[in-house]
């Protein structure tokens, strides 16, 4: 940060103090590929234990105060009690994620299924999720649909869009005044011929028709190779339609790797657009959520590492000399403008973040602090017997 004056340095630190990253309940549980779920010792057996693990991540990082739920994986009898349990441990419940893809009824789709009975069942589940939001105080309903077709002629493509719009409209009308609908898209899988929400344009069009409280979710793994995700970020920011991220990383498709692991430069470029638009602030409303399926690595330290990766990319984006960048861009100085970005990206921000954590009373190294805490050994010893709440449970 040598090129920044003290005021600018203070601004960088202030922005990092205010950063908020949401962790997903399912990332603490057993997970796997489509072929195998690998069990690990100490994983949560119910939603309460997932929240307990999320609270540990927040205590060590200081920037992960909310945990997203997935229904029915996190279904309980008393959601208000679950919210209080979270609050008592220093965290809150975040987005409510629906699930209309794991039942035999949804073989040919959920809200776009040709069978009206199946569509009704799917919409009723989405409405149930809004009711859970009411009970937990959650702001966001996050929707992802596996709906699509696998063969040409299997169904009417336009009719499926009509059914989707009808379902989204009914659920949108049920939202409370302070609640939002977040619509996620995915290029393909498990539908391979057509996916009903395959890209940001389709999600944007539906959200635009619904109204201001419908916004798009960008899952960073849900794109074709070579897609310029930061362009999508910039466009949706300009249209005030970027509601959330599902942060993960990928080499090929929806790999669900730890964010920043496959292409840390891409994560920096994305966060650069966020910072440039002054959209990092919590009051701007973007939900920065992790969504990776930790498969072979230990759960909690993997999530801590992901949180730290987002922090590092954000810190580098905050170090971009905006005045120098604007001057180079205005002058048509192509190499100069690129050099401004690269100077920030090439900065080692780990000492900065370690110092910030120390200022906040946290251990400068959250991973080392977790290893010393004995928490992994504690949960491995205590969480034996019973059915583990794993991926797909």
Image (cartoon, rainbow, N blue to C red):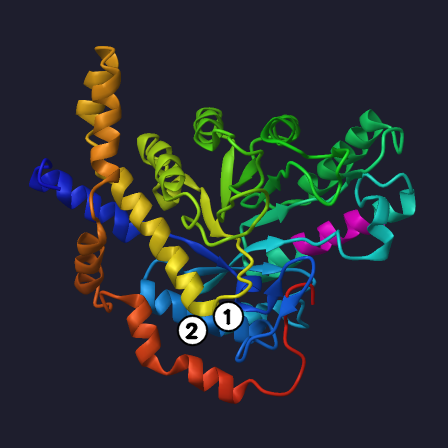
Q: Is residue 241 left or right of residue 201?
A: left
Q: Predominant secondary structure in magenta?
A: helix
Tag in front: 2 or 1? 1
Does the residue at mark 2 contact the one at mark 1 (Cβ under 8 Å)? Answer: yes
* x and y, in percent, of residue 35 in the image: 69, 60
Q: Is 105 drawn above or below residue 201 in the view shown? A: below
Q: Is 229 drawn above or below residue 64 in the view shown? A: above
User: Circle 1 sits in a helix, a strand or a loop, which is it?
Assistant: helix
Q: Is 26 drawn above or below residue 115 in the view shown? A: below
Residue 326 seen: no
Which residue sits at x=81%, y=57%? Answer: 103
- Along the polypeptide, which appears first: circle 2 or circle 1? 1
Count of picture labels: 2
The 10 Å Cα crowd at callout 1, few under 14, some 14 to 19, many 20 or more, is many
Q: Quadrant of residue 334?
A: top left
* x and y, in percent, of residue 215 in the image: 56, 36
* Closer to us: 150 or 271: 150
Q: Is 140 drawn above or below residue 50 in the view shown? A: above
* x and y, in percent, of residue 301 in the image: 41, 67
* Closer to us: 47 or 76: 47
Q: Quadrant of residue 45?
A: bottom right
Residue 325 on the magenta span: no
- Magenta residues span 121-130
Q: Which residue is mark 1?
A: 51
What whole-number distance in Å separates the C-alpha atoms at marks 2 and 1? 8 Å
* Closer to us: 113 or 122: 113
Residue 126 on the magenta span: yes
Which residue sits at x=21%, y=38%? Answer: 319
Q: Is residue 142 left or right of residue 262?
A: right
Q: Quadrant of residue 151?
A: top right
Q: Which residue is mark 2?
A: 89
């Amino acid at each position: 940060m040598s090129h920044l004056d003290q005021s600018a340095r203070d601004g960088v630190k202030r922005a990092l103090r205010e950063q908020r990253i949401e962790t997903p309940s399912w990332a603490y549980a057993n997970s796997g590929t489509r072929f195998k779920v690998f069990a690990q010792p100490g994983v949560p057996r119910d939603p309460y234990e997932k929240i307990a693990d999320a609270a540990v991540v927040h205590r060590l990082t200081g920037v992960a105060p909310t945990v997203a739920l997935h229904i029915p994986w996190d279904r309980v009898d008393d959601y208000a009690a679950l919210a209080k349990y979270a609050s008592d441990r220093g965290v809150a419940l975040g987005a409510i994620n629906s699930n209309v893809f794991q039942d035999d009824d949804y073989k040919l789709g959920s809200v776009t299924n040709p069978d009206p009975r199946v569509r009704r069942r799917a919409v009723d589940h989405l409405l149930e999720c809004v009711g859970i939001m009411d009970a937990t105080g959650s702001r966001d309903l996050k929707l992802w649909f596996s709906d699509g077709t696998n063969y040409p002629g299997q169904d009417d493509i336009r009719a499926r869009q009509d059914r989707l719009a009808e379902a989204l409209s009914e659920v949108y009308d049920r939202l409370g005044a302070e609640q939002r609908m977040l619509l996620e898209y995915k290029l393909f899988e498990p539908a391979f011929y057509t996916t009903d929400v395959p890209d940001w344009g389709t999600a944007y069009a539906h959200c635009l028709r619904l109204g201001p409280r419908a916004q798009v979710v960008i899952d960073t793994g849900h794109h074709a190779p070579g897609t310029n995700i930061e362009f999508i970020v910039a466009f949706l920011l300009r249209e005030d339609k970027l509601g959330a991220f599902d942060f993960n990383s990928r080499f090929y498709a929806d790999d669900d790797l730890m964010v920043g692991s496959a292409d840390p430069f891409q994560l920096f470029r994305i966060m650069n657009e966020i910072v440039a638009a002054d959209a990092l602030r919590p009051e701007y409303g973007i939900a920065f959520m992790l969504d990776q399926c930790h498969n072979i690595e230990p759960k909690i330290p993997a999530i801590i590492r992901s949180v730290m990766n987002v922090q590092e990319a954000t810190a580098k984006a905050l170090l971009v000399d905006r005045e120098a960048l604007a001057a180079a861009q205005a002058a048509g100085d192509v190499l100069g403008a690129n050099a401004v970005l690269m100077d920030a990206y090439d900065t080692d921000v780990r000492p900065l973040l370690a110092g910030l954590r120390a200022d906040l009373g946290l251990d400068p190294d959250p991973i080392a602090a977790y290893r010393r805490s004995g928490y992994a050994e504690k949960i491995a010893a205590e969480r034996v017997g019973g059915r583990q709440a794993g991926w797909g449970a």
